[in-house]
Image (cartoon, rainbow, N blue to C red):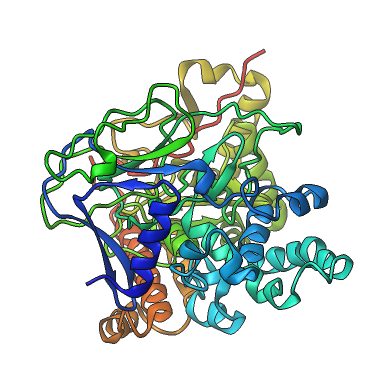
Amino acid sequence: MASRRLRAFKRWMKSKGFQWSDALEFVEIQEEGIAVRALCQLKEGDVVAKMPKEACLTTKTSGASEIIEEAGLDGHLGLAFTIMYERSLGADSPWVGYLQLLPLQECVPICWTLDEVNELLCGTELHQTVQEDKVLIYEDWKDNILPLLEFAPSKLNPKFFGIEQYFAAKSLISSRSFEIDDYHGFGMVPLADLFNHKTGAEDVHFTAMSSNYESDTDVDGYNNNEGIVEEEALNQNSSMDMTASNTANVENCIVSDMEGSSVSEGDTSMLEMIMIKDVSSGVEVFNTYGLLGNAALLHRYGFTEQDNAYDIVNIDMELVLKWCSSSFSDRHSRARVSLWRRSGYSACGVQNTEYFEISYDGEPQIELLILLHIMLLPDNAYHRLDLSVSVAGNCHESSGTTLLNDIVFPNKAFNMSKKLLLPKKVYDALLSLANMRESLYGLNSIEDDIEALGRCSIIREKKLYHSLMLRVNERKILQKLRSYASQPFKATNHSSQRKKLKRITKKSS
């Protein structure tokens, strides 16, 4: 039986013009939230829900729109203020039926205490990122929200606009917001955000028509480059299909409001949830937030998945230079990195940080192998290569190969084993880097972490459980990397899940 708040939410949706199929069942699971299940078989192409854009919570639909516009609050900052404002209205908010269903905040790391971040995320891909996020979010609040409370005390109740409330609003945006259109930008979409995530297993797709909304004010295109993690901003709760949708067809399980009420071609007032594959009766219906590893999932949504094939581990350039400094001078390191760059190679990068990815199967990024090889070249071979690059410039790139120590090394992905092309000392260096990266997790072994994870309750100890899952999966990747580095001459035929960044090709003059 549906809970009181779920029944209130359904009444609110009906009053706002939402439509959903009788084939959908909303199930509230204690301590876990709401899941959406199929009461009968759903077919590919079925439209199972329709949501009016004007009933979505955005900076344009909220009663705070004038304040937001006057203060110049855009993007996620404006949406966070919108959520806090509507919450401050209590029962007077037009979204009260929706807001009462939401948790106060999601269990994402930005809402953890700094002690919890340092203890639970130590060594993981998230540790430094979350530390930086917390500082930036606080500065956003201090610079943009706090002044509004000082200048408009009679309009805004300070207890709803404090730093804790701002972090809570940011957590909801991180985990629940969708990009609606070019006018509304990102917003909270009731009903659509009830569908849970499953990596690589999308059942239902969030769909919108592009909107050229006109108003008395001059509205610029929405800035969707914001987000807690910029590289994840391309994967909002669901990829957007900016085309007209198919008509509804859920056999005999359509709610009466859905019958014959397909959004007409060109209608931009409604959002839809469309089945993209068949789902059997009794099965949960999943959306997908993108093909994300556990670091991204925990960071934005507050959960992880076991044996996530999209997990990666990064080895920072700083760690590579630290390894190099144990055997070579700083001058040696700088010169070799410079030659590597002049040869046309580059690492992954976010802001001022450079790093190399280790894929789920333990295979290192090719650029890292090449850098290690250049680092370890004997002086005479290094000078030959340096001269070759200086004289020939980028001419060698036209053939798609680079000459390293008399070895023709392919620039891009190739079928033959990379292991056959580089000397064993490169893999010894890779093994050292794996051990250095492993040491960042502290004194506990991976066996200790696995044992702790087995004792942990995903319900009662959510933060500990998901942080341990992240640590264990990352450390398993490092185990695979050590295995890879320990067998340098054994050919491998597998291909990496990750091919995000390959050789940078320069234009030849």
Q: Is residue 238 above or below residue 402?
A: below
Q: Quadrant of the C terminus?
A: top right
Q: Residue at coordinates 39% horizontally, 55% vertically from top-left?
A: 293
Query: Along the horizontal axis of the image, is 348 left or right of 401?
Result: right
Tag count in the figure? Answer: 0
Q: Quadrant of residue 491?
A: top left
Give percent across and percent down for residue 387.
65, 28
| Residue 439 visible in the current orientation | yes
Q: Residue at coordinates 65% horizontally, 32% vertically from top-left?
A: 342
Q: Is residue 272 above or below residue 401?
A: below
Q: Which of the two residues, 31 or 451, is positioned nearer the viewer here?
A: 31
Give percent across and percent down for residue 108.
49, 69
Q: Which of the two residues, 299 or 224, is positioned nearer the viewer here?
A: 224
Query: Along the horizontal axis of the image, is 302 left or right of 351?
Result: left
Query: Along the horizontal axis of the image, is 343 left or right of 314?
Result: right
Q: Which of the two residues, 323 or 107, is positioned nearer the viewer here?
A: 107
Q: Is residue 417 above or below residue 74?
A: above
Q: Quadrant of the N terminus?
A: bottom left
Give percent across and percent down for residue 403.
49, 28
Q: Quadrant of residue 407?
A: top left
Q: Residue at coordinates 37% horizontally, 51% vertically from top-left?
A: 359
Give percent across and percent down for residue 448.
33, 84
The residue sitting at the top extreme is 509
Query: Along the horizontal axis of the image, is 103 left or right of 156?
Result: left
Q: Which of the two residues, 273 or 434, is positioned nearer the viewer here?
A: 273
| Residue 425 visible in the current orientation | no
